[in-house]
Amino acid sequence: MKVRQLRSTLWMFTAIAAVLAVVGWRYAARDVDARSLPSLRGVSGARRLNADSLHAAASSVAEHDPFRVDHQPSSVAYRAELEGVAPPPPLPKPPKPRLMLAGIIGGPPWEALLDSVPGRDGSVLVRKGDTLGGLRVRSIGRDTVIVQGVDTTWRLIVRQPWQ
């Protein structure tokens, strides 16, 4: 019983879809104006083109930069003399600082003395969360300091005189 109902329902939806498709096609076909379609007569349509209309069409296309997403000209002018020339090498990255832990002061909360901090002379007293020259102090423990840079994390340990 259920299969039979399902079949009849599907046939009904198929018939309704077919009727709607035919009505939509006829409605769309009525809106097309035969005069707006290009001539399919081959050579006779090509004879109507002249140099002025071709020039106007070419300038219209060139003004709108069809090969760029924003339809605007490039901000960098083309220079033919640079064709085939390799671009200059990228600037070298600045060297990573050689951070050194001079000592740890206090008890919880700990403070640390760091040497070789970029942009600072001598030792610098830091606390957890401080930022120095793009380096952030993540944590300070009894004998360890963790400093995080953009692409590097340093784990600094207090050096004993015999190490």
Image (spheres, helix red, strand yellow):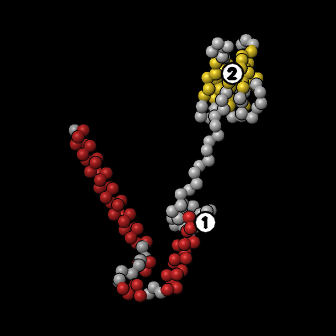
Furthest toward the front, the residue is 162
Picture residue at 64% right of the left edge, 40% below the top: 94
- Residue 72 visible somewhere in the drawing: no
Q: Is residue 103 visible?
A: yes
Q: Which of the two residues, 120 or 127, is positioned nearer the viewer here?
A: 120
- Residue 56 position, x and y percent, is 54, 80
Looking at the picture, tell me which residue is in the foreground, 32 or 87: 87
The residue type indicated by label 1 comes to Ala
Nearest to the observer: residue 49 or residue 102: 102
Q: Position of residue 47 (x, y in %)?
A: 41, 88
Q: Which of pointers 1 and 2 indicates the residue nearer the eye?
A: 2
> Horizontal placement of 62 versus 160: left or right?
left
Give the quarter of the image for residue 49. bottom left
Q: Say which quarter of the image contains residue 21.
A: bottom left
Q: In what element is the residue under mark 1?
A: loop
What is the secondary structure assignment of the residue under circle 2? strand
1 vs 15: above or below: above
Q: Position of residue 70 (x, y in %)?
A: 57, 61
Relative to 125, residue 63 above or below: below
Instruction: Say whether disc 1 or disc 2 marks the residue closer to the N-terminus.
Output: 1
Left or right of 55, for residue 106: right
Residue at left 49%, top 81%? Answer: 54
Q: Any mark on residue 77, and which?
A: 1
Q: Which amino acid type corresponds to the residue marked 2 in the rendered image?
A: Leu
The residue that appears at 73% across and 11% down in the rendered structure is 107
- Left or right relative to 141: residue 41: left
Residue of label 2:
101
The Cα–Cα distance between marks 1 and 2, rounded to whole angstroms, is: 51 Å
